[in-house]
Image (tube, grey):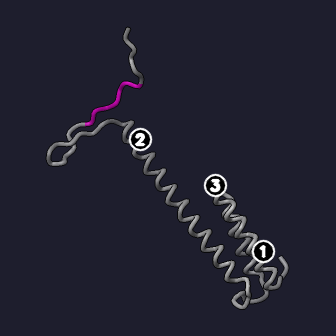
Amino acid sequence: MTKIGPDQVVFRLDALLDQEKAAILAGELERLGEIAAEKLDLIENSTVMLSDSPGLAGLRRKAARNDVLLQHVVEGIRDVARRMGAMADVRSGLKTYDHTGKEMQNILATARSVEKRS
């Protein structure tokens, strides 16, 4: 990559942050690594410090927005994992407890269908 000026860096980072947002919202999380690599390459190959750029505030807002979106994605994945674990527990059987809270027995779910009687 050739060295580029601050306006081009801001413009391209802005576009990458928009692509990142679109990937998050579309659930295309596999694209995030590629976008992160592009952002890193762009920053490493810029010729000037971006701290003087007037477009930096907008980049910060977009980066913060994407961070919040990613946090929600992580929370959603954790919720799904917990739910799947709970469903696996239900399939493995019913647990009962005595008055002290100790597990008493594990009643396995054996019937997978309902019997119809005439």
Pointer 3 residue: 27
The region drawn magenta spans 106-112
Mark earlier in primary sequence (1, 2): 1
In three-dimensional space, the C-alpha distance between marks 1 and 2, rounded to whole angstroms, equals 46 Å
Q: Measured along the vertical axis of the image, is residue 71 above or below residue 57? A: above
Where residue 40 appears, as percent x and y from the top left, is: 70, 75
Specify the quadrant that holds the C terminus: top left
Pointer 2 residue: 88
Name, please, the residue furthest toward the left: 99
Q: Residue at x 47, y 56 (%)?
A: 78
Q: Measured along the vertical axis of the image, is residue 71 above or below residue 2? A: above
Mark earlier in primary sequence (3, 2): 3
Whether tag 3 and tag 1 are in contact, CB under 8 A, the answer is no
User: Identity of the amino acid at label 3?
Assistant: Gly
Label 3 Cα neighbours within 10 Å, binned few <14 / some 14-19 / many ≥20:
few
Label 2 Cα neighbours within 10 Å, binned few <14 / some 14-19 / many ≥20:
few
User: Identity of the amino acid at label 1?
Assistant: Arg
Give the main secondary structure, helix, strand or loop, of the magenta stretch. loop
Where residue 24 appears, as percent x and y from the top left, is: 64, 60
Q: Residue at x 73, y 81 (%)?
A: 44
Q: Residue at x 80, y 83 (%)?
A: 7
User: Identity of the amino acid at label 2?
Assistant: Ala
Pointer 1 residue: 12
Residue 66 numbered tag: none
Task: Say which of 37 and 100 sits in front.
Answer: 100
